[in-house]
Image: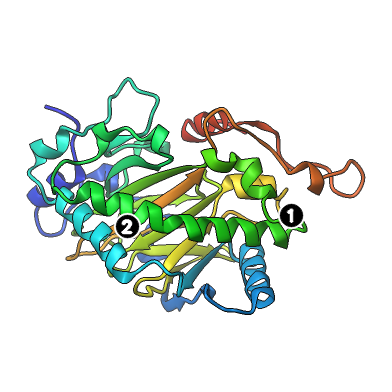
Amino acid sequence: MGVERVQDIASTISEDTIPAEYIRSENEQPGITTVPNTVLECPTIDFSDPDEEKLLKQIFEASIDWGMYQIVNHDISNEAISKLQAVGKEFFELPQEEKEVYAKDPNSKSVEGYGTFLQKELEGKKGWVDHLFHKIWPPSTINYRFWPKTPASYREANEEYAKNLHKVVEKLFKLLSLGLGLEAQELKKAIGGDDLVYLLKINYYPPCPRPDLALGVVAHTDMSALTILVPNEVQGLQACRDGQWYDVKYIPNALVIHIGDQMEIMSNGKYRAVLHRTTVSKDKTRISWPVFLEPPADQVIGPHPKLVNDKENPPEYKTKKYSEYVYNKLNKMPQ
């Protein structure tokens, strides 16, 4: 018997109960902690705005104030997004034993593969989610062993999506760099330049009889520099604003951008990583496709040298290898 999958649990439990390890403490239960009847409209930014100054200002302000925004008119076709979504959904609907072929190696340090647990959770609690991780760029880092062979179009849809992301990634890094008063290429260079890793994760949240008690993914900030996410139409993303939890409005075909920890570190705290979590639905399956833009494991990341000096702007973060940062974060150790 392998690892227990949430998808299996969801298909076998009765009407209104869930196993105890999925029941959150009261200070985390979405039924208690979500601000009711309020959908948070985090900034929506027209990425094709010809007024670059205006676009720069919007991205800069949203990255400082929110750490999360949605971009529309980003030039990735609705078709490319729906193909990515269709093949991912199809993979998770395969019989369980077919998915287990892609299971993560328990002894591997890599997160790649099909799995259920990711990080050490306090009090042994669990999130109501299964996932699949694999890198989609650069080609030298891809391990096709973790790319599903079924459906047959899985590879093509993912390669196409990765190719489409490049322009968005370049433009985001450029605008974020200029916003800090750096030259256009400096942030991208600091994070690894052309070795920047695109790590795709598919989150699969089956229907849950008690969505008021469980969470899909517990409150966290992303370890990445940036995350570019597309969800399906089932509400679930929540952001923390002034200590309160709000649902984030779903906008079809928008890309949700999260500022991640490495961007916060490189900007020396000017840009803020967004604290977010995921709720689940009673009768619908929620699926999301975040792509984490990460430095290579050996890349050393710290506040950008041009943004710090000993007097007015001392470094607020330690400088370290990305692999060390990840290890500390997943094991709940201090940075």
Q: Is residue 41 above or below residue 19?
A: below
Marks 2 and 1, how far apart at CA: 33 Å
Q: Residues within 10 Å of mark 1 (few under 14, many from 20)?
A: few
Is 81 on the left or on the right of 164, as rendered?
left
Callout 1: SS? loop
Furthest toward the right, the residue is 311
Residue at 30% of width from left, 63% of height from top? 80
Q: Quadrant of residue 309?
A: top right
Q: Is residue 112 above or below residue 48?
A: above
- Point out the tag, 2 or 1, that comes first from the N-terminus: 1
Q: Quadrant of the N terminus?
A: top left
Q: Quadrant of residue 298?
A: top right
Residue 104, image x and y in percent?
Answer: 27, 30
Is 320 on the left or on the right of 109, as rendered?
right
Q: Residues within 10 Å of mark 2 (few under 14, many from 20)?
A: many
Residue 67, image x and y in percent?
Answer: 58, 61
Residue indicated by mark 2: 288
Between 15 and 92, the residue placed more toward the observer is 92
| Tag of residue 59 | none
Residue at 48% of width from left, 70% of height from top? 71
Q: Is residue 129 above or below residue 117?
A: below
Mark 2 against mark 1, which lies toward the viewer? 1
Callout 2: SS? strand
| Tag of residue 183 | 1
Is 1 on the left or on the right of 190, as rendered?
left
Question: Would you say residue 110 is visible in this rendering?
Answer: yes
Q: Amino acid at mark 2?
A: Ser
Residue 165, image x and y in percent?
Answer: 43, 57
